Amino acid sequence: MNTRVIGQFDVEAVRAAFPILRQEVNGHPLVYFDNAASMQKPEAVIEAVAGYYRRDHSNVHRGAHALANRATEALEGARERVAAFLGGVAREEVLWTRGTTESINLVANSWGRANLRPGDEIVLTAMEHHANIVPWQMVAEATGARILVLPVTEAGTLDLDALPALLGERTRLVAVAQVSNALGTVNPVADIIRLAHAAGALVLVDGAQAVNHFAVDVRALDADFYAFSGHKLFGPTGIGVLYGRRALLDAMPPWQGGGEMIERVSFAGTTYAEVPWRFEAGTPHIAGAIGLGAAIEWLQEQDREAAAAHERALLERLDAGLETIAGVRRIGTDPARAGIASFVVESGHPTDVGLLLDQQGVAVRAGHHCAMPLMERFGVPGTVRASLALYNTAAEVERFLQALDKAMGFLR
Ligand code: PLP
């Protein structure tokens, strides 16, 4: 394929690490532009998972044998890698979960149920993923708390002017995505955290779409909770992370009960383990954590600034190309977005566009992107979303634009 290097970034070398990209779909070389839904995995991650199962697998903790010790060391080593990746937090502040969704549910059920009282307020934004809406609705219903929503502007950015009026003495928590999964908008979470803290509220940052695009330092951000998913960071599915500030985690009750999370169990009563294990009931996804550790190691070997510049150049070309195709309307037009272009077409449903692109080997996502309130805000049933990763190429952007142009020919 006719690919090229933008700046110092050798995209061909990066691509070579991803075996799945070397295939044809419907008779065309695959163009994978569905990265916001899930990223592909480099060989290093596939090997780390396979190698663990080939050589080291056993259940973890309390093991009296070599394999159990190896598995435990690998699991806890991966935790340390995540702690460093998040800017050098303590390993006890890193909890394994199944993904962003479970991380947010953990905070809602543990911190939320213990701390929210009738009339307390939770501030969300109109661009949140359902994973950062529904758990709060459930806990609000259970506790009598109220949900307030920060609006989104026509450009698909947060209306920050409206934030001070939403923050008051009843605000307990602000939960906000760092990058919108539907539009790619990068939200100024550091500013939001500053304002929220000044009002005495905690902040949970949904980093699912952020960690793969740029380095994140949760301490510098001063986030209280930070959530992300392994599979959106070149790692396995079924593994995720919740960072929580140590003092908060220490004060939070367990959410799920079972093995691994206890100190001592008797029918007279149970005492719980220290953090992080207090929040990790049951056998963890050991291979998933190891795979995520390998994904982070792989990512850290890349020139992340060059990768970001590469993605930015691709997105600029994508935006400019979309502007030239008649009948296409972009949704979310902030130029500083991260890796995502969302649009609707006048003459067809997003799903029709998705299917016509798939016939040409181009994978995108079409629908509401688990952000129905945002779709409602823009008065559309859904959008077509092309989302990029550092392994995508300029040639693929051209292929996508040609395929879309052709699809529009069928739809007009
Ligand atoms: N939050 C955001 C911003 C997302 O993009 C996603 C996934 O699309 C989620 C939360 C949920 O992630 P997961 O399904 O991995 O739990």
Image (cartoon, grey):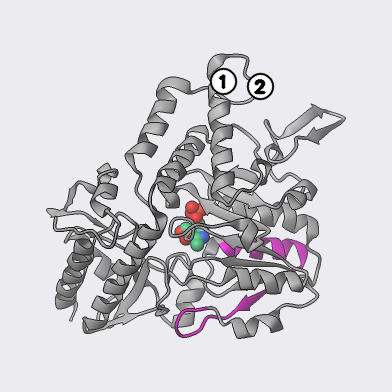
Give the quarter of the image for residue 267: top right
Identity, as a three-letter code, of the amino acid under mark 1 = Ala
Q: How many marks?
A: 2
Rate crowding at label 1 as few (under 14), some (14 to 19) or many (20 or more) other CA atoms within 10 Å: some
Give the quarter of the image for residue 147: bottom right
Residue at the location (70% across, 84% down)? 165
Residue extending furthest toward the front = 8
Is residue 366 shown above or below 58? below
Residue extending furthest toward the top = 65
For label 1, the SS is helix
Q: Is residue 86 visible?
A: yes
Q: Quadrant of the C terminus?
A: bottom left
At which x and y percent is residue 317? 27, 73
Give the quarter of the image for residue 46: top left
Identity, as a three-letter code, of the amino acid under mark 2 = Arg
Q: Is residue 121 visible?
A: no
Q: Which residues are magenta?
A: 132-157
Residue at the location (66% across, 61% down)? 222
Residue at the location (74% across, 32% down)? 262
Nearer to the camera, 332 or 254: 332
Q: CA distance from mark 1 to mark 2?
A: 8 Å
At which x and y percent is residue 230? 48, 47
Label located before the other in sequence (1 or 2): 2
Nearer to the camera, 379 or 16: 16
Residue extending furthest toward the left = 27
Label 2 near label 1: C-beta < 8 Å?
yes
Q: Does 114 sit left or right of 130 as displayed?
A: right
Give the residue at mark 2.
62
Nearer to the camera, 133 or 212: 212
Disc number placed over residue 68 in the picture, else none: 1
